[in-house]
Image (cartoon, helix red, strand yellow):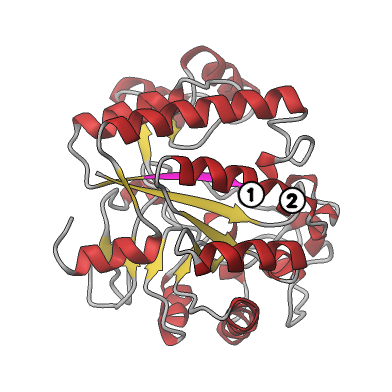
């Protein structure tokens, strides 16, 4: 089994929704994570936003890791705070519009701006991508293909409601993806329906997520319980409907649970993800202090060590693409 480590490499505390994400102090905490990955021979893929691509510390750090062939840098555009400026709502910096809400020509320009910036800063080809807030569709996919992208990892399988809708004058006018009908295995996208396999040159490598509820609990959660407080109470008792291969402050054991489940299933790969700001105390809502960060690292190191002992090999997103083309996996 191959391990893909993806880091949404972006500004500080984007969850605050007040513009703080333009600060990039969390870049200073990435070398520690890189060292942990290299300890086990694993290679992270840093999916990078515009503000981080302009951070001198990140550029120097990533350039060194790239020269040593110990990482990959990919694209993770936050459309609300990067050029070209295009106002979608009255409060874009608070609402954080999805890329798929923008006109195709604006999506194309934003992809071009960040692609060109990263390649100029790092002197390396950029060919892997994850959409901000997991918002992806066929228009976006075709634009990525225009710029030579090989891999996308925006699909969150088994999750029907990952993207919250808005109401009022700023209501979303686009169709949001229902990822519960998408495959959980890699496939080349269809140009008209990215939930299906097709002939586009873009390989979809879905995030590793496993169902946590059986059929009955899922039916109760999605069809019988009102959204809001009651669903929060339900999750407090039974956990979330899905388990992601990403760290959480509430259920540290989920990482190992997911890894063991994927190993039992004899899966070809497992994809880990974290936000770069989740590696900095106070840079996110989950890990608010050094003690919480240390616990997060302990759980990550534990599952990385277990995977290493089981013979799991670390590859970047583009390396996995090359292996997939060769039929391995």
Name, please, the residue furthest toward the top.
237
Q: Alpha-carbon distance for marks 2 and 1?
A: 7 Å
Q: In this picture, is 320 found above or below 111? A: above
Location of mark 2 (residue): 28
Q: In the visual, does 170 lie left or right of 125?
A: right
User: In terms of depth relative to the viewer, which is nearer, 199 or 45?
Assistant: 45
Q: In the visual, does 241 lie left or right of 313?
A: right
Boundaries of the magenta span: 271-275
Q: Which secondary structure lies at badge 1?
A: helix
Pointer 2: residues within 10 angstroms few (<14), some, or many (20+)? some
The x, y position of residue 137, in whole percent, is: 45, 68
Magenta stretch: dominant secondary structure: strand
* Quarter of the figure that contains the N terminus: top left
Residue at x 72%, y 59% (from the top left corner) = 96
Q: Which mark is residue 102?
A: none
Q: Quadrant of residue 320?
A: bottom left
The x, y position of residue 246, in whole percent, is: 50, 37
Residue at x 31%, y 67% (from the top left corner) = 203
Q: In this picture, is 49 found above or below 308? A: below
User: In terms of depth relative to the viewer, which is nearer, 323 or 267?
Assistant: 323
Residue 117 within the segment the image draws in magenta: no
Location of mark 1 (residue): 31
Q: Are marks 2 and 1 in contact (CB under 8 Å)?
A: yes
The x, y position of residue 29, in whole percent, is: 70, 46
Residue 273 within the segment the image draws in magenta: yes
């Amino acid at each position: 089994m191959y391990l893909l480590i993806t880091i949404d490499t972006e500004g500080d505390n984007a969850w605050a929704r007040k513009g703080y994400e333009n600060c990039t102090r969390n870049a200073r905490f990435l070398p520690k994570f890189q060292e942990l990955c290299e300890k086990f021979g694993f290679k992270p893929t840093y999916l990078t936003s515009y503000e981080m691509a302009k951070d001198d510390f990140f550029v120097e750090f990533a350039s060194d890791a790239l020269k040593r062939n110990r990482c990959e840098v990919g694209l993770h555009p936050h459309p609300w705070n990067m050029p070209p400026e295009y106002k979608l709502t009255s409060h874009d910096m608070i609402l954080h519009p999805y890329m798929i809400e923008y006109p195709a020509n604006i999506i194309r320009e934003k992809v071009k701006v960040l692609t060109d910036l990263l390649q100029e800063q790092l002197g390396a080809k950029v060919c892997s991508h994850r959409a901000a807030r997991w918002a992806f569709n066929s228009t976006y996919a075709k634009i990525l293909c225009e710029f030579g992208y090989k891999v996308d990892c925006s699909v969150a399988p088994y999750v029907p409601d990952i993207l919250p809708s808005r109401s009022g004058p700023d209501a979303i006018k686009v169709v949001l993806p229902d990822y519960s009908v998408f495959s959980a295995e890699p496939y080349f996208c269809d140009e008209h329906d990215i939930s299906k396999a097709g002939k586009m040159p873009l390989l979809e490598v879905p995030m590793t997520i496993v169902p946590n509820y059986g059929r009955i609990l899922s039916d109760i959660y999605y069809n019988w319980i009102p959204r809001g407080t009651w669903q929060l109470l339900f999750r407090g008792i039974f956990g979330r409907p899905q388990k992601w291969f990403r760290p959480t402050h509430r259920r540290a054991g989920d990482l190992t649970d997911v890894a063991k489940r994927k190993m039992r299933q004899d899966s070809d790969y497992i994809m880990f993800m974290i936000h770069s700001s989740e590696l900095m105390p106070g840079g996110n809502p989950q890990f608010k202090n050094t003690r919480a960060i240390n616990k997060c690292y302990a759980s990550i190191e534990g599952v990385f060590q277990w995977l290493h002992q089981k013979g799991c090999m670390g590859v970047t997103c583009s390396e996995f693409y090359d292996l997939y083309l060769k039929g391995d996996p």
